[in-house]
Image (cartoon, rainbow, N blue to C red):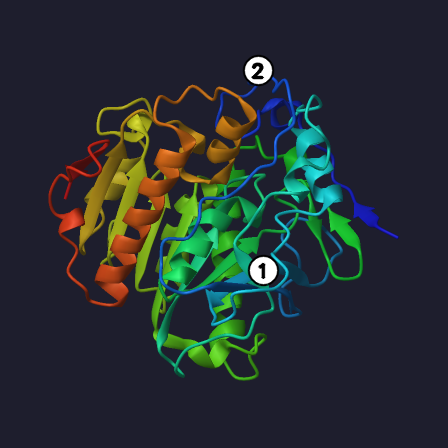
Amino acid sequence: MLRVLSGPRSRAAVAVGLAAGIAAGVLPPPATAAATLELLRPTGAHPVGATTLHLTDTTRPDPWMPGVGARELMVTVWYPTHARHGTRTQYMTPEESGLQLAARGMTDLPADVFSTVRTHAYVDARPAGRAHSLPLVVLSPGHTQPRSTLSGLAEDLASHGYVVAAIDHTYETYAVTFPDGRIATCGVCAFDHEPTFRARQHQSRAADVSLVIDRLTGPNPAWRGSRLIDASRIGMSGHSAGGASAIPAMLNDPRIDAGINMDGTTSELIPASGLNRPFMFLGTPAHAPGGRDDSWDTDWSHLTGWKRWLVMAGTVHASTHDLALFADQLGIDLGATTTGARSMEITRRYNRALFDLHLRHRPQPLLDEPSARYPEVTIAAR
C-alpha cells in the first residue's frame, strides 16, 4: 500500500502550470486530447542504462520536516551500457503523475500521462566502460519539479559517455516515491514564499549534491557501476532552483569542477571572494543582460574563472527541461516561439559542450563564437 507523506501546499504553487515556469496564478490552456509522450532520442554512440538509488544520510536531519532524523533521497543514475534491449525506465509512476498534475491544476489530462512516457534507457542494464574513466554530472531540477524532468538531458549525456545522477530533493516536489511505497509530497510549499526560503533551499540542495557525490565516489559506494566514475572529473547542472543551487554546491564542495545554471535566479549567491571554477549561465531572454531578471549581473561579476553567459531566443523558463517538449506534444502553448524539441536539442548540446571542454579537455568552438547551427543562441558575455 502506498503511504503519502503530506505537506500543505500554497495556493501559488498549486496555480503554477505544467512547467512551473509560467507566472504564478496563470494556467496554460488544457490539452484537448491525450497523447503518448516521448523523449528525444539520445545522440551519442552508447546505449543507455539507468538505475534508481535510495540514499539515507543519518548524520543530517531532514531540513524541511521537523522530527525526521535523517535525510532521504531518491536518485536516478544514467550511464553507458552495451545492452540494446530490455525494460525501458518509467518516467514517473502513475501515482506520481497524478499528484504532479493535480498539484498544478492540470485536471484535463489523464492522471497517468507521465507514467507512459517513452524513454530510451534500460532498467539496471550492465554498466560499460573502463574503471575510473567516465566523468560524473549531477543534475538538480527546478522547485517543485521531480528529477525525471531532466531525463532527456541525462540520457543524452550518458549516451556520450557520462555517468549522470539526478536528484529528487525530498519535500520540495509534489511526489517522491521511496522503495517501501511511501510518497513524500511538497512539505515546503506551505512556506516557500517566505523571504529566507530560497537561501535555505540552496544550501539544502548543496548538501544533497555532496551526499550523492559521496555515495557514488567514496568507499562502499551505493551503485555497482561506481568503479566507472573518475572522481577527479565532476560537473553539475540544474534548472531554475537547481541551476542556482549549483553555485553554493560548488562553493561548498571543491570536488565539483564545472557548473551550469539553466535559468535559475541567483540573487547574489557568490561572495565577493568569487568562484574561480568554470561556470556557465544558460538562460531565456528574461535572463539576458538588462533583461527582466537582472539577478545574474552581480554573480557574473564574481565569477573569476572561465565563464560564459548564453541566451536562447524564443524560449521561456520551462524550455530547458522535458516538460517543454511534452507541452508541444500535448498541444499546450507555454508562450515559447522556439519549440520544445528545438530548445531541448540546444540545451543538451550546450551542456555537453561545457562538460566536454572542462571535464574532458576537448576544444569546443561552440562556446567561443556564434554558431550557424544554433542561431537561437547568443553569447551575451564571456
Q: Considering depth in this image, is 168 or 85 the residue closer to the camera? A: 85
The disc, 1 or 2, on the residue closer to the chain's N-terminal end is 2
Q: Considering depth in this image, is 15 or 124 the residue closer to the camera? A: 124
Looking at numbered disc 2 in the image, what kind of residue is underneath it? Pro
Residue for point 74% across, 43% down: 94
Of helix, strand and loop, which one carries label 2? loop
Disc assigned to residue 267:
none
Would you say residue 20 is visible in this rendering?
no
Residue for point 57% across, 37% down: 37
In x, y percent, where is residue 268? 33, 41
Residue at the right extreme? Answer: 1
Residue for point 49% across, 23% down: 22
In x, y percent, where is residue 321? 45, 40
Residue for point 63% across, 17% down: 32
The quadrant of the picture occupied by the C terminus is top left
In x, y percent, where is residue 103? 68, 30
Of helix, strand and loop, which one carries label 1? strand
Which of pointers 1 and 2 indicates the residue nearer the eye? Answer: 2
Which residue in the structure is indicated by mark 1? 75
Which residue in the structure is indicated by mark 2? 29
Looking at numbered disc 1 in the image, what kind of residue is underneath it? Val
Instruction: Give yes or no for contact between labels 1 and 2 (Cβ–Cβ under 8 Å).
Output: no
Q: Considering depth in this image, is 71 or 181 the residue closer to the camera? A: 181
Residue at the left extreme? Answer: 369
